[in-house]
Amino acid sequence: MIEIDHVSKVYDGKTVVDDISLTIEPHTIAVIVGTSGSGKTTLLRMINRLVELDAGMVRLDGEDNRTIPGYELRRRIGYAIQGHGLFPHRTVAENIATVPRLNGWDRRRTTEKVRELLSLFQLDPDAFGPRYPHELSGGEQQRVGVARALAAEPNVLLMDEPFGALDPIIRAKAQDDLLAIQKHFGTTIILVTHDMNEAFHLADKIAVMDGGRLLQFGPPDELVRRPATGFVEAMVGAGDRPFRLLSMRRVADAAEAGEASGPALAASMNQQDALAELMWSGRPAAPVVSADGTMTGRVTLDALLKRARGAP
Amino acid sequence: MSRVTPTLLRALLLALLVTFLLAPETFEPLLRPLVQQNAPVIYAQGNLMSLTLQHLATVFAATLAATIVAVSLAVLVSRPIGAEFLPLSRSLVNIGQTFPPVAVLALAVPVVGFGEKPTLIALFLYGLLPIFENTLTGLTTLPRAVVEAARGTGMTGWQRLVKIELPLAMPVILAGIRLSVVISLATATIGSTVAARTLGEVIIAGLQSNNLAYVVQGGLIVGALAVLIYDGFSAVERRLAVRS
């Protein structure tokens, strides 16, 4: 659990983070969104003390993060940034092994961990381990950057616009990979982004910041239904609201008994995609098929439209 | 073809240099036209090979000292605690560069006496600037994301310096050392005016006895050494720079 408790930061008389408190539950993903200059990156960097706070306290599992030296704290917390920051003079394997080596792991344990992580990120350890970062594509570099952040098995992973430099297709893949990795390790992730779609895709809870202040912190669907301020409403995008709601739910939740014609939709598909599919094929309803291949009923255009208006 | 030629030329130059140093009399016919009748053609008051090695040893010692001091100074002023010493350090190394080595020799002799010492002092002062400025540039222009990542992974200040910053700045630092070495190789010759054993001895003897062959052989050996060492450094820099 990460408790940010009345934290402030002042640079040259300007308050960039203004009395922020929020608590992030273990094994969840919290996404901090805001425009540039909102203080979101500064807030993130105060958790691993790349920036020292001026007032307040950050507690990790109840322990003040100032009780141990900054560098030791940072070895316990994963950190991934935009533009990956890989060390260009070290191979991929050496880059990933950075924190385990700093922690004094023995060679065998380190090598095993590096191989495990490379495989997990769908990079062949024998092919990619000995390469240098400049020999990799942007998407591969980014994956290695996240792998390095996870190498010492941290409970907490901080990510500062980690996918900002990727093109949309690779970015979507990287986000799905991150969700899978988070499930695999149970890591608590705090991610900073200015991309609202990314926030809605990844977050268990979203924090909206503006001008150094925290405007709202809650589950995505709460931000859509009950935005705390006009700024939050604008960030969510008034025109996107129905689609945001649909994108957070599965087809299975809107399915009802009955039959329909045409190709079936997967129960795990999100409702926004299902709506798009029905509109595109001009059907009023489509059959729903579960993961094991059995027909479980149908989903209708009306049911989806009702949910887009906020019905449960 | 075009990639092999420079390497061949360098190997040829090295072979020529070594042959000349080991058996200078082989080249006597070539140099003969430069001197008057009956005058000696090949410098014989000292062994050319041992003079060359002495010359190199002096340059090496001075450059090593300059490297240690200049790199340490640049590291210090590139840290937050040393930042206020930057203008002072810069002035010091600039004075070292602008003060003519001949004047340094003149001032140093009364204090430390004749011989190697005044030459070492002059070369040391003269060599500081390129190494200092290049190290500083190398350390302060590292990619921001890389430096940030080094902090973020939990490296201490020392670990960041030794494992990340210095290795990444190495090609630029080496370029500074290369400049300094080449300048010192040429400048070391004037050390012979205060009785240091360098190749300047051959040139000065030639000037005093109006023997052009002496001047040419002293000058050519220094020139060949400079070209070969310059090339050697450049090759190492290129290899290091490929990765970053």
Image (spheres, coloured by chain):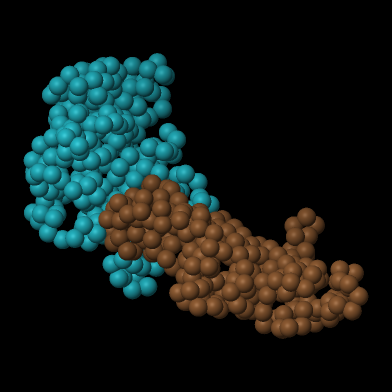
Chain colours: A cyan, B brown
Whether residue A280 is visible to the viewer of this picture, yes or no, is yes
The location of residue A124, given as percent across then percent down, is: 48, 57
Residue nearest the observer in this picture, B54 or A87: B54
Relative height, residue A121 to residue A162 (above, below): below
Q: Quadrant of residue A81?
A: top left
B84 horizontally vs A307: left or right: right
A305 horizontally vs A162: left or right: left
Residue at image x 66%, y 62%?
Answer: B231
Q: How many marks?
A: 0
B172 horizontally vs A222: left or right: right
Q: Quadrant of residue A231?
A: top left
Relative height, residue A105 to residue B147 (above, below): below
Residue nearest the observer in this picture, A192 or B10: B10
Residue at image x 78%, y 68%?
Answer: B216
The location of residue A80, given as percent across then percent down, is: 33, 48
Whether residue A297 is visible to the viewer of this picture, yes or no, is no
Residue at image x 84%, y 79%?
Answer: B40
A74 horizontally vs B107: left or right: left
Residue nearest the observer in this picture, A157 or B70: B70
The location of residue A143, given as percent across then percent down, is: 40, 49
Residue at image x 50%, y 78%?
Answer: B113
Say which quadrant the C terminus of chain A sits in. Answer: top left
The location of residue A275, given as percent across then percent down, is: 33, 22
